[in-house]
Image: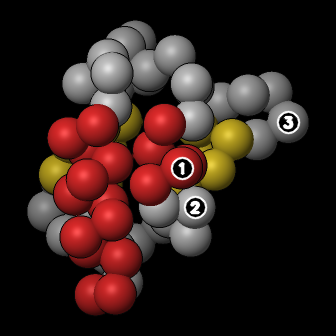
Amino acid sequence: MEIGVDRSLCEANAVCVGFAPDVFDLDDDEELVIQPGPVPNDQVERVSDAIKGCPKNALFVTG
């Protein structure tokens, strides 16, 4: 599982960071940063919850 973000929808409100801080973060410019590569197995449930919980539906599975 890999994650993508539609930057035109993302408001960087950090809801996803709350669900999965090991995968999502905000940089100094308050832009969403996603850990590169596949989501670690121990984070899949948290990331799935983050995708479902995104208030702007900006996150999606890419692979």
The residue indicated by pointer 2 is 21
Which secondary structure lies at badge 2? loop
Residue nearer the viewer, 1 or 21: 21
Q: Which of disc 2 and disc 3 is earlier in sequence?
A: 2
Residue visible at 45% across and 44% down? 16
Which secondary structure lies at badge 1? helix
Amino acid type at mark 1? Gly
Label of residue 28 in the image? 3
The answer to whether any part of residue 24 appears in the image is: yes
Residue visible at 32% across and 17% down? 56
- Callouts 2 and 1 close, C-beta under 8 Å: yes
The answer to whether any part of residue 34 appears in the image is: no
Query: In x, y percent, where is residue 25?
Result: 63, 50
Q: Would you say 29 lies left or right of 6 here?
A: right
Crowd around label 2: few <14 · some 14–19 · many ≥20 (10 Å): some
Marks 2/1: CA–CA distance: 6 Å
Amino acid type at mark 2? Pro
Marks 3/2: CA–CA distance: 16 Å
